[in-house]
Image (tube, helix red, strand yellow):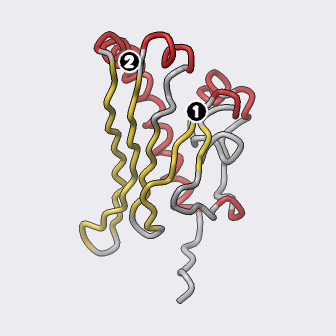
Amino acid sequence: MGWGRAGWYTYRWVDQLLFPANGPSADRIVSELQQLRLGDRILDGPPQSDCWFTVEILDRRRTMALRSTRHVPIAWRDRFGASLEWVWSWHLDQPWPGVTRLVQRNRMKLRPRWFEVAFLAAIVPADFVMARSHLQAIKRLAESTPVQEAAA
């Protein structure tokens, strides 16, 4: 996932609207992009935007968690002291044999209060659309890709 990688697996119209310079999200799992490690950065915009996630937790068979403190425009950080701490995670759960559930979670801490209110009013509804398309694409890709067992 990420800018300069496979995108965010969102609807094509979302990619065109929000990420036109990055191109469309991948429509397949790209094997050469599967080499993430703890501490790696996943860009969420062009490098000059100073916006990225850091891989904080990575258990390839169950959990991935990304963390960012960089999702506020630089000018807002400097001028208004605006900040956002964001943890975005995915966890595979197997409630019973043969059934796998993907749980996606977001946790955010925003400051100051006016920024939190504006963010919740504007971004959260838009994120619902993005998260839905993101999860549907992951499901489609996972179900269309043969499972490869990890080497012992």
Mark 1, mark 2: which one is toward the viewer? 1
What residue does disc 2 label?
119
**Residue 38 placement (x, y as % from top left):** 51, 61
What residue does disc 1 label?
51
**Residue 126 placement (x, y as % from top left):** 44, 22
Category of crowding for the residue at label 1, using alpha-carbon neighbours closer than 10 angstroms: few (below 14), some (14–19), many (at least 20): many
**Residue 44 placement (x, y as % from top left):** 59, 36
Residue 48 image-quadrant placement: top right
- Is residue 147 or residue 60 the one in the foreground? 60
Q: Secondary structure at mark 1?
A: loop
Q: Secondary structure at mark 2?
A: helix
- Is residue 40 or residue 89 the one in the foreground? 40
Real-space CA distance between mark 1 and mark 2, rounded to the nearest whole angstrom: 16 Å
**Is 93 placed above or below 87 here?**
below
- Is residue 83 or residue 14 the one in the foreground? 83
Three-letter amino acid code at the position of disc 1: Cys
In the rendered view, does 44 fall on the left or right side of 99?
A: right
**Is 145 placed above or below 122 here?**
below
Q: Which of disc 2 and disc 1 is earlier in sequence? A: 1
Residue 36 image-quadrant placement: bottom right
- Is residue 33 or residue 145 the one in the foreground? 33
Residue occupying the point 38% across, 21% down: 125
**Is 105 placed above or below 79 here?**
below
Three-letter amino acid code at the position of disc 2: Phe
